Image: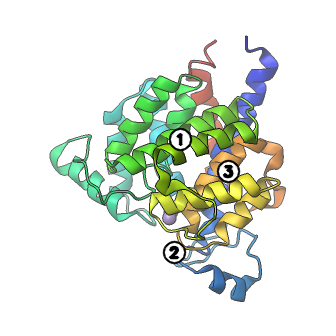
Amino acid sequence: MFNQYNLEEIRDRARASFIGLAVGDALGATVEFMTSTEIAAQYGTFRDIIGGGWLRLKPGLVTDDTEMALCIARAIIRSQTWSMDAVAENFAAWLKGRPVDCGDTCRKGIRRYMVHGTLEAPPNQWDAGNGAAMRLLPAALFSLPDGQRMNKYILEQAHITHNNPVSDAACICLGSMIHLALMGASKSRLRREADGLVARFPTFAFEPYRGLATGYVVDTMQTVFHWFFRGKNFEDCLVGTVNQGADADTTGAICGMLAGAYYGMEGIPGRWIKKMDKSVIAEIEQVTDKLIAACPLGGF
Ligand code: MN
Ligand code: MN
């Protein structure tokens, strides 16, 4: 059913999704924790990868969002299967290496694993941050196009740090949208997935848009949905998203993975790719190709 041409296109969309994540992370990091008003006063419209921000990043470097996704990707590739032990070990090694940033819930969950060896955080109504959603891409790529497998992988990687029904719902919806976009679905088809999430969890309603873009996964997803569905191209989607400020690297990363899967490599502005750290992009291309080669669809 899937000919060579389709697999080529899927590989291109998959690369664009992972590179889109990194580009959104690198772009948004500069304005993370600023308000939209502060961004407008300082930059007009903020639209270039220039580094800086509260983390004082070099232009083109990425943060925890991309790094944790790479931890999952490397674990899959080294294990040649889905192994939560390998994912957890990579998270632990990453945290010991003093990453440039790490969210509180992620840190708490990884430390619990390091002390107790448990792969699942206890359910917690407050652990509804966006940390599980921001890093789920490798689980979506490695399961393509099997929805059941995707749900299992996505929730297992989430629950190491975030065991919360609102986070779970956001992760499953995002994973489904990425699967659909990789297979070439239209925006109206993707919109049905977002509407389905809102039907099950009305708190995710994003019309009218409230303009909140915090690390609370509900605010994060509202911002991504609002700008992804109204954006005319990859750049539009990302610029709208990060100019909301707040958790801009993570809203940027999530919008970037979705818009990348939807628009493909030709959608990502060359000036952004050029600014990115070369070794980050090289590793992303390599792991993405391996994940797609090893997924149920790639093995067809
Ligand atoms: Mn970050
Ligand atoms: Mn962030």
Q: CA distance from mark 3 to mark 1?
A: 18 Å
Which residue lies under the disc numbered 1? 173
Kind of residue indicated by mark 2: Leu
Which residue shows up at 70% across the image and 36% down it? 189
Q: Residues within 10 Å of mark 3 (few under 14, many from 20)?
A: many
Q: Secondary structure at mark 3?
A: helix
Kind of residue indicated by mark 1: Cys
Which residue shows up at 34% across the image and 64% down it? 104
The vertical placement of 246 against 238, above or below, is below
Disc 2 versus disc 3: nearer the observer = 3
Which residue lies under the disc numbered 2? 55
86 relative position to 49: left or right: left
Q: Quadrant of residue 89?
A: top left
The reply to whether residue 19 is visible in this rendering is no
Kind of residue indicated by mark 3: Gly
Q: Are marks 3 and 1 in contact (CB under 8 Å)?
A: no
| Mark 2 lies within 8 Å of ligand 1 (Cβ measured) | yes
Disc 2 versus disc 1: nearer the observer = 1
Q: CA distance from mark 2 to mark 3?
A: 20 Å
Which residue lies under the disc numbered 3? 20
